[in-house]
Image (tube, helix red, strand yellow):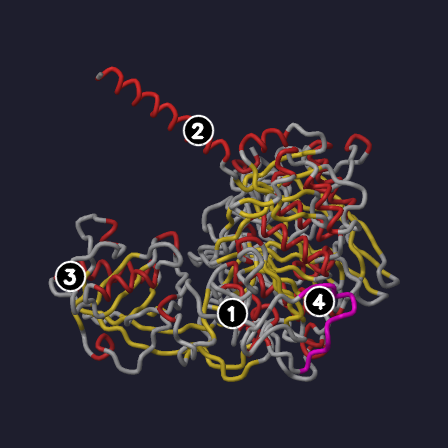
Amino acid sequence: MRTHHLGLLLLLSSAALLLAVSSAAQERKNYVVRLEPRDDDAGSSAESVEEWHRSFLPEATTLDAAGDDGPRIIHSYSHVLSGFAARLTDAEAESLRSKEGCLRLYPEEFLPLATTHSPGFLGLHMGKDGFWSRSGFGRGVVIGLLDTGILPSHPSFGDAGLPPPPKKWKGACEFRSIAGGGCNNKVIGARAFGSAAVNNTAPPVDDAGHGTHTASTAAGNFVQNADVRGNAHGTASGMAPHAHLAIYKVCARSRCSIMDIIAGLDAAVKDGVDVLSFSISATDGAQFNYDLIAVATFKAMEHGIFVSAAAGNDGPVAGTIRNGAPWMLTVAAGTMDRAIRTTVRLGNGQEFDGESLFQPRNNTAGVRQLPLVFPGRNGDPDARGCSTLVETEVRGKVVLCESRSIGEHVEQGQMVAAYGGAGMILMNKAAEGYTTFADAHVLPASHVSYAAGSKIAAYARSTPKPTATITFRGTVMGSSPAPSVAFFSSRGPNKASPGILKPDITGPGMNILAAWAPSEMHPQFADDVSLTFFMESGTSMSTPHLSGIAAIVKSLHPTWSPAAIKSAIMTSSSVADHAGVPIKDEQYRRASFYSMGAGYVNPSRAVDPGLVYDLGASEYIAYLCGLGLGDDGVKEITGRRIACAKLKAITEAELNYPSLVVKLLAKPITVRRTVTNVGKANSVYTAVVDMPNKGVSVVVRPPMLRFTRANEKQSFTVTLRWNGQPAVAGAEGNLKWVSSDHVVRSPIVIPPAKAVA
């Protein structure tokens, strides 16, 4: 009897196991499916494209168009790549991989999301004689943003003074029944994709705040009397306040699916945007034919669309750059000269400046000295970061906390407040240096540098009864040094292509005031309808600055290619701060080109660069062949059959890029560049080389370029050699073409020996 029961139990267990295995085998997962391109995907109807895509599904699933988990085909792509996104079982995915015409399957992945003063800091002023006014503030240009959506009712998106959408515009507006807002002559299109659209039943309203912030930074209209809790008061606007906005919601509550991102890029190209703003971190260092963002933006470039993309927030570690394809402008984050100032005064009289958006008129920590405590003096790192606190130790005191990751600073203050702390001093880790955030803390707080924090910690450890006061100074202009590179901004070299300098440029990315939407990312303010602007930091914030600046350049030079606009921005940038000394990094050391790119953007010079380094698809293809991707790899990126053996492949250093990275060893290397005259018809430029390392010889031939007409092209060579033994540390310098009206500067980078091995 017992044996019978045991046998039955084993039988039931086996059946359950088989059922579980069968269920697991039938579980559907999301994939992006890359296909061999057809000749006219982009010109075919949506129905015929989807029918072709459906033909790749196993026969049993073609009738099963939708299931309990939604439709089998989620997106059909036609403009930025040939393929589709689908829900497939493991068996179906394996079957599809073996089908003729299927190139590759990519499992779904989620990519992370990477102002009143920044226009003035960048030299954008309202005067009628200024170039900003002459440009029409970007009038007529369409900026497409791939992000978390938008709050259409925000005053930054009013359309006063804006013309109707351009005739070429083909986009759609999915806002339905939105109180006080919707599409107009500012927001001319808005769509949501995949999970961000909740199966296309919800409009592309911002649920994270991020998209509203980036959209207004790029092209928000003028809004007077903007501030955040009384700080940073002034007139808010984007870089191109009269440009149009097209919104593509591809992220839901800050989760961005690669399937939806590609669908948004596909739609943006089809709709007819001029500039794409991409504040999302792509794959770190993936070979370009495996990087769907690189593939999709290559097609955007071919359609004449300028792409501005975030460098990522993984600095200051080297080799962390994101969005590194050379056809994108990769944007780093820097500071400005505005601080939301707090001051810490210790019981011994020492004072240290910090920042915080919490700026009350009256508070306990700002009235009198309070006991100061630094938890974790016995080595507990969680306590040092105020993750674990003891109420009896911190109640009624000012608590010194070591900074945790970006985005957790407010949570640290909430922890201190929950345990009865009266105030918080947030000190940087060593790697974070002097970069401080004006966060919206929930208690009196001051975010100080590592240098200041170390001195405060030493005082707290060495004094029997340490005390501290936090006082609040409000908005302080003219803080120095400015600009500098923020510690979190990702650094080169570019793993996918180390011979191309990345990032390309630095823009304002610290404590940026811009439009705000109630969001789950800031739940402490979710119910505060009066808070219409907010401060955020990241390469997500620097990227739309450059998107808007590109729109201004595009409005003044509508025939320029994306590469020409990019060159204009890079070669006109600044390497000196507002005090006239070299721009610094987060440690206040001289910033390298691997941290800031060509330099800090200078819009007033970018619209009149004199010369540009232009590029098109054919040059990029020769470069891709030179990377050694093979015919198939290049075809995956370009969508066309390529025979690299029949082309003249070029090295990375030979790509006509506005910067030069030369892997210089014992032998001299010569590279060629071609510039196009976009300044005065008759002009003369003289080569000036600035190479501080005297062990490097740089010779430019010819040393002078004479132009007699507009759009004339001339070529030159640059020969580099070590005068003695190659320096292990490498070298950096600049090549400048100088005329009576222009200085056209290109960085020269010789990587450290360990980086070129």
Left or right, 172 with respect to 311, comes to right
Give the mark toward the camera: 2 or 4: 2
Magenta part of the chain? 161-172
Judge depth for marks 3 and 4 and give the one in front. Answer: 3
Are discs 2 and 3 less than 8 Å apart at CB?
no
Amino acid under label 4?
Val
Q: Is residue 577 visible?
A: no
The residue depicted at 55 percent of the width and 48 percent of the height is 70
* Image spot of residue 264 (x, y percent): 63, 55
Instruction: Provide the residue designation for mark 4.
Output: 553
Cα distance in 3D space between marks 2 and 1:
68 Å
Nearer-N-terminus badge (2/3): 2
Relative image position of residue 354 (x, y in whole percent):
35, 68
Circle 2 is placed at which residue position?
A: 21
Alpha carbon separation for disc pair 2 and 4: 58 Å
| Disc assigned to residue 579 | 1
Quadrant holding the C terminus: top right
Closest to the observer, 108 or 131: 108
Left or right: 135 with respect to 683?
left
Spatial distance from mark 3 to mark 4, Cα to Cα? 56 Å
